[in-house]
């Protein structure tokens, strides 16, 4: 197709290149956007439209000017980064089997992680691989002591939201960057661009690094991610880092996977459950009738979901029959179809801090302050694209 | 026509130079330098204009050269979003050269169309030498 400026022909850009770029994140169906549909139909696109549209879909406009050979190099580089940093199983997931992890989110986080490691001298993270060879009990003790988690304080919080905040703070203090899915402030290409539900099946996962591993919590982008589930996800992902087992992630079908887990996966679930709901608490229940009230009390006290309680009790044979197990499973969580209230959009710096995580936020801000980062680089790291309006608000909000 | 690279813009800002001559920057350089203005706490002199703001700037031609330079030269990264300033300078040089082949089309800036680039970037200097034999490259200390 021809790139035009005020309807005057400028240069040809390859249709195949445009299509390949728009299919980089195929689940987002960017190729169906009216601007591009018209471009293919008319065999031309206006430069201003391409630039404006690129800002909306968070892909640099310059990329569309690449020829096939150079685009292949770029895409191969991105693929290599993904292959080095995340589980091949995670990348292989496809629509129709429940788990579709957004490659856009993965790419954004890898870019942040690469920026941190390339521009800072960080020591090896002592937690990486530190659970290898440890018994379950030793692994639990190590996790609690390493992250300085006061488990009684954690359980003593009145609600799971406060317990989650406590846990997030403890883990983040030890050079593990926790990134959370956010739906606000255009951190992802949404709002009249991509349907929110595109990201909802993204699982919790880890981006490998021996200095600053990244954890991704779906949070807002997955309506099933209630606080108790997020707590479980954090511990599960920490266990992966500690065991150097990056080929696992939190499956959407948690119940079935936890119950059928064998070998390494069984170990991961066992350690995770033991941290949150210790065997000594469930052994006391052996032989007694477990009621929904018992289940909910345990979920409340140990800050996990009622489902996680029932699954754990079933794995530990505290719940002995399948019928009892099924009767105790709570009905699937049904998030409200329409929000009961419309919270105000948080400040841009709050959304960035949440999506990028503590260390990304701090290191990028330091790069901006020192002048080490250019304006364009900073915006791509923070927002995934040039967004001058948000960047100004961001810098004003933080006085940088 | 005196063109500034990013490091030349930073040189001006850091020294808070009062410029005698007229200079220009590309859109990419202007965008890349925005943080520098804020960090250093001073605005770029009005003696520095956007090349694309000239009525004689031909964006159709510029984008064609931009595409060519983008695909021809290494050193830019979509992953880190770096190196596009260099591409934009090369594209601007090519555009001006082509535009001024026919003198009747007028000039972009200034009274002559001698092309001068101010930069300390060795990689960019090599590319300029390769692409535009007419262009003279100066170190930032020559900015006045």
Image (tube, coloured by chain):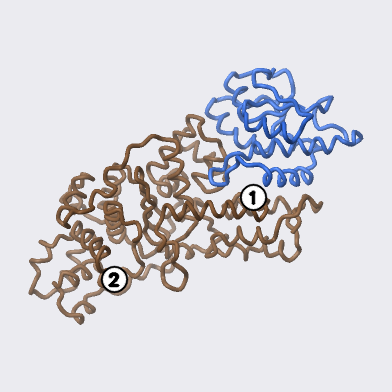
Chain colours: A brown, B blue
Q: Can you identify the residue that label 2 sits on?
A: A255
Q: Name the secondary structure under disc 2.
A: helix
Q: Is residue B17 above or below residue A331?
A: above
Q: In this view, does B35 lie above or below A387?
A: above
The chain under label 2 reads: A
User: Residue A32 or B89: which is nearer the viewer?
Assistant: B89
Picture quarter with the N terminus of chain A = bottom right
Q: Name the secondary structure under disc 1.
A: helix
The answer to whether residue B78 is left or right of residue A332 is right
Query: Can you give x and y, in whole percent of width and height, for residue A381 in the image?
Result: 50, 44
User: Residue A302 or A321: which is nearer the viewer?
Assistant: A321
Q: In this view, does B39 lie above or below A327?
A: above
Query: Can you give x and y, in whole percent of width and height, for residue A53 in the image?
Result: 64, 54
User: Residue A129 or A50: which is nearer the viewer?
Assistant: A129
The chain under label 1 reads: A
Q: Can you identify the residue that label 1 sits on?
A: A61
């Amino acid at each position: 197709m021809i790139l035009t400026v005020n309807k005057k022909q400028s240069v040809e850009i390859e249709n195949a290149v445009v299509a390949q770029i728009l299919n980089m994140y195929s689940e987002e169906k960017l190729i169906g956007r009216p601007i591009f549909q018209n471009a293919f139909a008319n065999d031309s696109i206006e430069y201003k439209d391409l630039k404006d549209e690129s800002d909306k879909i968070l892909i640099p406009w310059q990329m569309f000017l690449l020829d096939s050979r150079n685009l292949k190099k770029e895409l191969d580089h991105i693929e290599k980064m993904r292959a080095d940093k995340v589980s091949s199983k995670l990348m292989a997931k496809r629509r129709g089997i429940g788990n579709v992890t957004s490659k856009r989110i993965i790419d954004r986080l890898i870019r942040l992680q690469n920026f941190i490691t390339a521009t800072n001298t960080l020591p090896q993270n002592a937690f990486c691989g530190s659970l290898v060879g440890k018994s379950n009990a030793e692994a639990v003790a190590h996790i609690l002591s390493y992250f300085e988690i006061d488990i009684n304080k954690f359980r003593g919080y009145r609600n799971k939201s406060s317990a989650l905040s406590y846990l997030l703070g403890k883990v983040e203090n030890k050079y593990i960057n926790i990134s959370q899915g956010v739906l606000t402030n255009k951190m992802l290409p949404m709002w009249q661009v991509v349907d929110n539900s595109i990201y909802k099946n993204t699982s919790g996962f880890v981006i490998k690094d021996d200095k600053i591993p990244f954890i991704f919590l779906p949070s807002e982008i997955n309506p099933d991610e209630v606080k108790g589930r997020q707590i479980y996800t954090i511990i599960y992902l920490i266990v992966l880092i500690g065991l150097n087992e990056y080929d696992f992630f939190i499956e959407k079908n948690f119940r079935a996977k936890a119950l059928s887990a064998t070998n390494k996966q069984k170990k991961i679930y066992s350690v995770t459950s033991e941290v949150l709901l210790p065997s000594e608490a469930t052994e006391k229940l052996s032989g007694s009738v477990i009621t929904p009230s018992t289940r909910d009390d345990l979920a409340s006290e140990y800050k996990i979901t009622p489902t996680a309680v029932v699954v754990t009790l079933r794995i530990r044979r505290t719940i002995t029959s399948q019928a009892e197990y099924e009767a105790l499973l709570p009905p699937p969580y049904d998030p409200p179809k329409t929000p009961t209230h419309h919270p105000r959009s948080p400040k841009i710096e709050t959304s960035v801090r949440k999506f990028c995580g503590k260390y990304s936020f701090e290191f990028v801000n330091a790069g901006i302050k020192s002048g080490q980062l250019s304006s364009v680089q900073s915006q791509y790291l923070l927002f995934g694209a040039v967004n001058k309006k948000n960047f100004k608000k961001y810098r004003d909000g933080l006085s940088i | 026509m005196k063109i500034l690279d990013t490091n030349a813009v930073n040189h001006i800002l850091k020294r808070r130079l009062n410029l005698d001559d007229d200079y220009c920057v590309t859109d990419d350089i202007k965008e890349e330098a925005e943080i520098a203005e804020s960090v250093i706490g001073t605005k770029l002199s009005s003696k520095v204009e956007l090349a694309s703001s000239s009525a004689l700037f031909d964006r159709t031609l510029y984008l064609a050269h931009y595409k060519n330079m983008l695909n021809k030269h290494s050193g830019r990264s979509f992953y880190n979003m770096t190196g596009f300033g260099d591409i934009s300078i090369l594209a601007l040089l090519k555009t001006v050269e082509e535009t001024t082949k026919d003198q009747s089309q007028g000039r972009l800036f200034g009274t002559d169309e001698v092309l001068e680039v101010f930069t300390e970037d060795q990689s960019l200097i090599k590319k300029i030498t390769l692409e535009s034999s007419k262009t003279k490259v100066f170190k930032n200390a020559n900015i006045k």
